[in-house]
Amino acid sequence: MFQVSDLKGNQFLDLVDRDNNLLELSYIKGSPWLQNFSHSNSLCVRATRAITNHAPIGEYRLRFFPNKEFKCLYDQYPIKSRQYILYECKRFNKYWNSQRNSITHFVMFLERNHNAFAFSNDIT
């Protein structure tokens, strides 16, 4: 029901598998997408924040803390968005592949950029 309805909202990041098929999301143990993050709680948390777009980034700060600074410190981009972080930000360039909608490359991006989609006290 989640995949074919509007229940997931327009901010949800759709990821694809190696065959470019849309991943079916499930919380059931052994689900295809959750297996990619199971080795690290921190990775799973940051991936969930990125996928749901509930991450401590400029969009989040603008909505909840409108009087605070929310520009990217690296290239003065007006509002850091998920799209910007995944594809453009100079701070998060330790892994580059244009296929970041692929679960494999999305995980590699997160593993190489430990600060991406993390609150400052999440960083290990």
Image (spheres, rainbow, N blue to C red):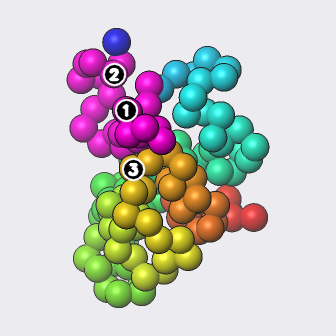
Say above or below: 51 vs 9.
below
Q: Image quarter for residue 44? A: top right
Q: Image quarter for residue 108? A: bottom right
Q: Is residue 114 left or right of residue 10?
A: right
Type of amino acid at the residue the image marks with label 3: Asn
Type of amino acid at the residue the image marks with label 2: Gln
Q: Quadrant of the C terminus?
A: bottom right
Q: Image quarter for residue 39? A: top right
Q: Which mark is residue 42?
A: none
Residue matched to label 1: 22
Write the start and end of the magenta stretch as one range: 2-24
Q: Nearer the viewer, mark 2 or mark 1?
A: 1
Q: Nearer the viewer, mark 3 or mark 2?
A: 3
At horizontal 65% and vertical 51% (from top left) the residue drawn is 43
At horizontal 38% and vertical 33% (from top left) the residue drawn is 21
Which residue is situated farthest in the top direction here?
1
Residue matched to label 3: 101
User: Which comes sooner in the sequence, label 3 or label 2?
Assistant: 2
Residues tagged 2 and 1 counted as in contact (Cβ below 8 A): yes
User: Which comes sooner in the sequence, label 2 or label 1?
Assistant: 2
Residue matched to label 2: 3
